[in-house]
Image: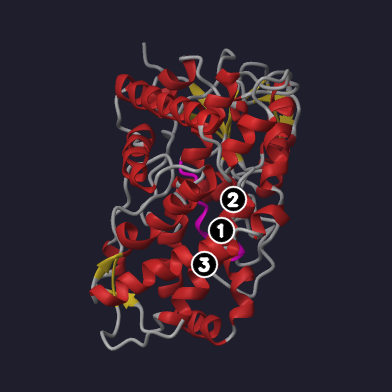
Amino acid sequence: MTDLSDALPAFPMTRPTPFDPPPGYAAVRDAGGLARVRLWDGRTAWLVTNYEQVRSLLGDPRISVDRRREGFPFPTPGREALERSGKTTFVGMDPPDHTRLRRVFTKYFAVKRIEALRPVVQRIVDDLVTDLLAAGPPADFVAALAGEVPARTICHVLGMPLADRARFQALDHERNTLTTSPENVIRATNEMLAYADELITRKQREPADDLVSRLVADQLGGDTISREELVAAVRLLITAGHETTTNMIGLGIATLLRHPEQLRELRADPSLVPAAVEELLRYISIFHISPTRVVVEPIDIAGQRLEAGDGGIAAVAGANRDDAAFPDAATFDLHREARHHVAFGYGVHQCLGQPLARVELQTVVETLGRRIPSLRFAGDPDALEIREYAFLSLAALPLTWDAAEGEGR
């Protein structure tokens, strides 16, 4: 007997270039914004691609993020093994547990507190750019800059030795590569949890001026969060604090270089940088496997009844290219009002670390425009390789510049 799901499009969908969502997202959006897709295990889920419907799905309390619920749509075998292992963080919890734990961390990521880190991020970026200029062109900007800025920043924020960044980067790459076996995903996650536990223990013995030390002093031993929950949350902060921003920096630089007239305008007027970063976040939308949910109570979306137990996939990359929300959405336009994008998600599970990501992205864009104005591709930009990853990710970004570039800061 033929499985009818075999005739459905597979998810995750192929993204043929780093600069555009899968064509299937637009096809679904043009057909009403909702369609069945087939997962790796033959099960089906509802893919949502319209802006308003994505926000509706992510903001509806009848939708759950709890990976333990029956019908939850896992995009890969590794993700299912990981989430079924029971080592979830608050991002995989529904209220009231999500509310309780998120409240613990919200104050540490307040915009005012994160803005105080801007000079630290600036020093990190300046040091890396100085090293690049001293070494001379060409360089792989993924390895030399995009990976280093978030890693060094999160080491500073959490109070981790800088030498440890290669260890957690390698483990997180393994966790997030879509072809990693379930066994290796679990092993890498357990190693990261062990590292987080060791870090907490070290801060208990030797507190310093960093976020983990403050969490230990403020929260551990009270009745709000357990040590196991804190370990899981610190592991999340280590990985979420650098992986997505690494990918956004690389793809953001590449996108700006593909639009030289707008890049020249940005260099001439740095006040445009914050708006340009919002447009980059919208235009790129790096979440490849998208936020996934499961229906708890029946809901109606795009004229279709979704029943309890149905999986839902909110394609934020599709929503951010919806012309109804962003006129001429396929065009990159740094003058666009793009702040209402859903690149950080939507609703109660919206990304907690978005203020830090914005500071890092803005600092990189402004500094490169000022210090390396001749920056350009060292090769064919259409030949950039996408890694098979949970987030849209470049394997490398070969760039070059004039060797006589000034050292102005």
Numbered mark located on residue 343 in the image:
2
Q: Callout 2, which amino acid?
A: Ala
Residue marked by disc 1 = 281
Residue at 53% x, 38% y: name it.
237
Query: Which mark is nearer the camera, 3 or 1?
Result: 3
**Left or right: where does residue 342 sit relative to residue 133?**
right
The quarter of the rendered structure image containing the N terminus is: top left
Residue 7 included in the magenta stretch of the image = no
SS label for mark 1:
helix
Measured along the vertical axis of the image, is residue 107 above or below residue 359? Answer: above
> Front-most of 306 and 215?
215
Query: Which mark is nearer the camera, 2 or 3?
Result: 3
Q: In the rendering, at what x and y percent does residue 33 appear?
A: 62, 43
Q: Callout 1, which amino acid?
A: Leu
Query: Which of the two labelled residues, at mark 3 and mark 1, occupies the earlier sequence position?
Result: 3
Residue at 57% x, 65% y: name it.
119
**How far separated are the C-alphas under marks 2 and 1?**
6 Å
Q: Magenta-highlighted stretch: main secondary structure? A: helix
Numbered mark located on residue 122 in the image:
3
The answer to whether the residue labelled 2 contacts the one labelled 1, judged by CB atoms less than 8 Å apart, is yes
> Front-most of 360 and 323?
360
Q: How is the image coloured?
A: secondary structure
The magenta stretch is 278-288
SS label for mark 3:
helix
**Left or right: where does residue 66 sit relative to residue 396?**
right
Residue at 61% x, 67% y: name it.
328
Specify few, some or many for label 3: CA neighbours under 10 Å numbering under 14, 14-19, or 20 or more: some
Q: In the rendering, at what x and y percent does residue 196 appear?
A: 46, 29
